[in-house]
Amino acid sequence: MGRSTLLNTDTEDLKELLSNGKTYAVPPYQRDYSWKIGHWEDLWEDIRGLEGDDGDHYMGAIVLQSHDRKKFQIIDGQQRIATLSILVLACIAFLRDLRTRGIDAESNEHRATLLESAFIGAKDPVSLRVVSKLHLNASDDKFYQLNLSQHIPPAGSVRNLSDSEKLMWDCFQFFRAKLAEHFRANPDGGTIAEFINVIVSERLLFIIVRVQDELSAYSVFETLNARGLELTETDLLKNYLLSLADRLSKGQMAPLLDQWNRITDRVGSARLPVFLRHHLNSRRSYVRQKGLFKIIRDDVEDMPGVFALLRDLEVDAAWYQALGDHNDQFWLDYPGAREHVRVLNLFRITQYAPLVLAAKDRFNIQDVVEVLRYCAVVSFRFNGVSRRSAHSQEEVYNKASLAIRNGSATNLHDIRRLLAPIYISDEEFEADFATLALKANGQTGKRLRYILCQLEKQIDPKELNDEIPTSATIEHILPENPAESWNATFSNSDMERFLERLGNYTLLEKQLNNREAANRSFEQKLPIYRQSRFALSNGIQYEEWSPAAIQERQSVMARCAKTVWKLDIPMS
């Protein structure tokens, strides 16, 4: 695509935007009107601020798609354009209220008609109805055209309106009240018309971005988002997929919209692009986030493609949702999986998702659980302890996923072989573990607790169940606030270096930690540790606690760790 056809941009005010017979439509499958009172108040204050100076106010970017110079689809900006149109409608209604009250009736009706023609739409000479310059989506347009544009209040109770219709009606009422308050002292029609015709229409400026197709729109989205302007990636993906269905009837479109909403409800709109990339990486060569939209556009060109993609996405969305929550009831059907997912959640690891999404389509339940275990072990070594780059990790998971799909990986032995490039060797893992330092609070505190409990289970398996016992607390052997007696074995720099080293932590019952251990000397703590049921504590045999003792104890822990988090990786 040449540069000249990608996009063109202009800075325009509302008057230029709506002039020369241009019309705008929100695609029928875009989201409903959603601005609320906070947005309306911010807009009103911005406009009020323009009355006191000669400056302009920038309203951000509006992205339009069109193949001609008159008719445009709104890719991004519908909330702003719809709200400003409702503000103009409120002003027109206010002028007609003045006419009804006999205040300069003929002139105010003329002003209202001119504003209506300039910003809302001209009246059809046959029906005498306003033919609107703006059409909203399938849910909102009927109310906008038949009620707001024609100045007809909703029939019956406002409670019968849909959520978005009620928001539009509340927006109209909000601006009517603001205008009445603002012009109460001087209800002059000329001043009111000038408020819209000059301040609102000429001094609110937009960056107008016109594109020719969805791929151009996506490129614009990436550029503007990088500059801090808010566009919705999920909406753009949805717009493209459902634009292929624009010839369907409303009844045929509804199931597609329902399916899309089920998918986004499961994974969340904000997370949907990441989920979509994981979905694709479980089925095709490695996809980066930046190339996501182009791949979808190239792969999905017709309605059968849309149906197939949404069908597969809906299945994978249920898995993706469960992979993000180890307490999900989904895992009741996969005995043993919950603990592995808990570990992956604890370390906030998601790169493995494509492998599981592929495995669930080819392997039995027990093998899928075992694949999850592999992912947890590999991730703990790779991300949790050795902290290697996630980029190479994603590519390995992608290759393993494709091997499952094409039939070259049919069993667990094959999976372990494919994961070998990101399985940190025992030697590297032991060395990295021997220097590991973690804070004892927040998310890292939870990870520390998990590590200590896994080591405890390895040392004394009968002591702990799979769940971390509530009686276990994390004890600093060298205290966080050591008494002066600790200065004999730790310099100030040693205290900073070794306080959060793994070797300085142990598990201790709450009653022993809170009442007795506290900040005492090591000699005073030892008898307390020997009362503990945890082997990590009652097994401490050092006569003196020093940097050397911490390092030695952590080295012992590291040798134990490589047996706790271990896979039998085949030789290549």
Image (cartoon, helix red, strand yellow):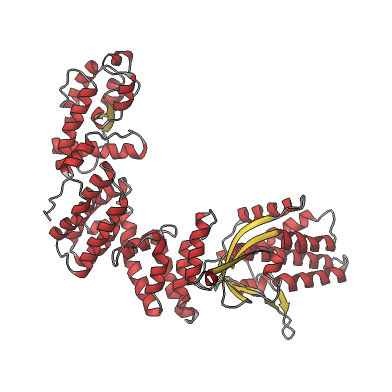
Q: Camera-side residue: 423 or 135? A: 423
In the drawing, does residue 106 fall left or right of residue 477? right
Q: Determine the residue located farthest toward the left in the rendered image.
A: 571
Up-down relation of residue 5 to residue 502 (above or below) = below
Residue at the (42%, 63%) spot, across then down: 264
Q: Pick the quarter of the image with the C terminus.
A: bottom left
Q: Determine the residue located farthest toward the bottom in the rendered image.
A: 126
Q: Camera-side residue: 391 or 311? A: 391
Rendering coords of residue 143 (x, y %): 62, 72
In the drawing, does residue 95 fall left or right of residue 327? right
Residue at the (31%, 35%) spot, across then down: 438
Rendering coords of residue 346 (x, y %): 31, 45
In the drawing, does residue 538 fall left or right of residue 270? left
Q: Is residue 336 visible?
A: no
Q: Is residue 128 visible?
A: yes
The answer to which quarter of the image holds residue 146 is bottom right
Rendering coords of residue 236 (x, y %): 48, 66
Q: Camera-side residue: 469 or 29? A: 29
Q: Camera-side residue: 117 or 258? A: 117
The answer to which quarter of the image holds residue 145 is bottom right
Residue at the (72%, 65%) spot, across then down: 88
